């Protein structure tokens, strides 16, 4: 049976989970038990995968010493060090390599496509896991900073050649759920038939100006100081100079050639 939201659009429990999703970094002492993790991952492993390659692996981390080693890599994020459970979503070519070797073939000169396919596979599984966890009442946050030092992360997690951690995820039972951060206007993100043909004819300049104002208002309502051009200024600060400049060489060392 379909229900409709305030815009008159059809909605479901799944749609509402996504509409209400926030990143949660504060958790109760209640453990996320093995049964919940297994249920989440079994569901996530039904995510789409390119040509049925299934080129991903997930490292489940609970050990406090391991978490203590991962936290500095991520910029000392406290919720990583104190994670009820940390899931490392990895692009993994080891099974592909094993199959190729069985038939006397090699992926030694693997190309950009292989790296993209495995990374996208891991991302699809990660988002599916996040949604599955949400459906159980478990909240979490993605940890892209695990790539701050891809080689150190690989060392801590024991990742072999042909495996790298695309991102991590902390999961726990929520203690504090923050207000939802606004997203860019729908009309500025959707293109009808051809790129640039936005619903209502909005321009990129209009979209960004509106979002700057909306995000600044959100931050100020939380007591945070920010610029009027909140999103654009924050973006420039994050990407100039470019972050993780060693990442390409680090991934090449792990057998991922993104050249």
Image (cartoon, rainbow, N blue to C red):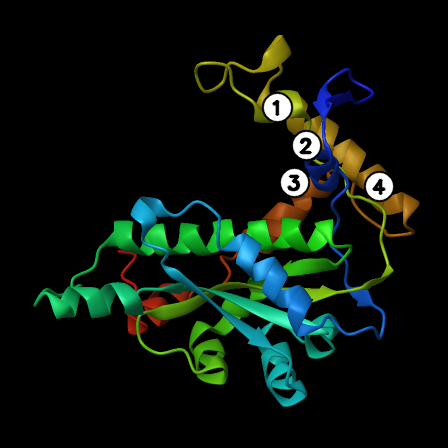
Visible residue check, residue 55: yes
Q: Residue at x 40, y 55 (%)?
A: 119
Asked whether disc 4 touches disc 2, contact meaning CB atoms under 8 Å apart, the reply is no
Pointer 4 or 2: first along the chain? 2
Distance of mark 1 from mark 4, alpha carbons?
19 Å
Please provide percent x and percent y for residue 44: 54, 54
Left or right: 180 in relation to 56: right
Mark 4 / mark 3, whichever is N-terminal: 4
| Mark 2 burial class by Cα count in 10 Å: few <14, some 14-19, many 20+ | some
Give the mark, 3 or 2, whose residue is nearer the N terminus.
2
Decide which of 15, 71 is in the foreground and name it. Answer: 15
Numbered disc 3: secondary structure: helix
Q: Are marks 3 and 2 in contact (CB under 8 Å)?
A: no
Work out whether mark 3 precedes mark 1 in sequence or the reverse, and give the earlier one. 1
Mark 4 and mark 3: Cα distance apart in space? 15 Å
Disc marking residue 232: 3
Label 1 crowd bin: few (<14), some (14–19), many (20+), radius 10 Å? many
Label 2: element kind: loop
Q: CA distance from mark 3 to mark 2?
A: 12 Å
Q: Label 4 vs label 2: CA separation?
A: 13 Å
The quadrant of the image that shows the C terminus is bottom left
**On the rendered structure, is 129 left or right of 220?**
left
Q: Residues within 10 Å of mark 4 (few under 14, many from 20)?
A: some
Contact flag, marks 1 and 2 (Cβ < 8 Å):
yes
Q: Quadrant of the N terminus?
A: top right
Whole-percent x, y for residue 256 in the image: 30, 64
**Which residue is labeled 4 in the image?**
218
Residue 102: percent from the left, percent from the top?
14, 69
Residue furthest to the left in view is: 104
Disc number for residue 188:
1
Residue at point 25%, 63% (across, down): 96
């Amino acid at each position: 049976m379909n229900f409709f939201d305030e815009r008159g659009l059809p909605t479901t429990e799944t749609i509402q989970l996504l509409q209400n999703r926030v990143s949660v970094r504060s958790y109760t002492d209640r453990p996320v038990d093995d049964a919940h993790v297994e249920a989440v991952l079994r569901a996530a492993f039904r995510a789409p995968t390119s040509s049925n390659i299934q080129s991903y692996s997930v490292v489940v981390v609970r050990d406090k010493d391991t978490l203590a080693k991962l936290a500095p890599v991520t910029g000392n994020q406290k919720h990583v060090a104190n994670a009820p459970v940390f899931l490392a979503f990895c692009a993994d070519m080891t099974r592909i390599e094993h199959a190729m070797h069985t038939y006397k073939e090699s992926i030694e000169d693997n190309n950009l496509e292989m790296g993209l396919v495995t990374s996208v596979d891991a991302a699809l599984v990660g988002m599916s896991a996040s949604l599955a966890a949400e459906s159980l009442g478990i909240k979490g946050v993605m940890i892209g900073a695990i790539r701050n030092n891809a080689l150190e992360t690989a060392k801590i997690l024991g990742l072999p050649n042909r495996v790298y951690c695309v991102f991590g995820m902390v999961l726990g039972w929520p203690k504090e759920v923050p207000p939802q951060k606004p997203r860019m206007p729908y009309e500025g993100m959707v293109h009808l038939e051809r790129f640039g043909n936005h619903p209502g004819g909005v321009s990129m300049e209009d979209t960004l100006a509106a979002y700057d104002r909306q995000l600044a208002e959100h931050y100020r309502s939380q007591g945070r100081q920010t610029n009027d051009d909140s999103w654009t200024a924050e973006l420039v600060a994050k990407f100039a100079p470019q972050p993780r400049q060693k990442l390409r060489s680090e991934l090449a060392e792990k057998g991922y050639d993104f050249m």
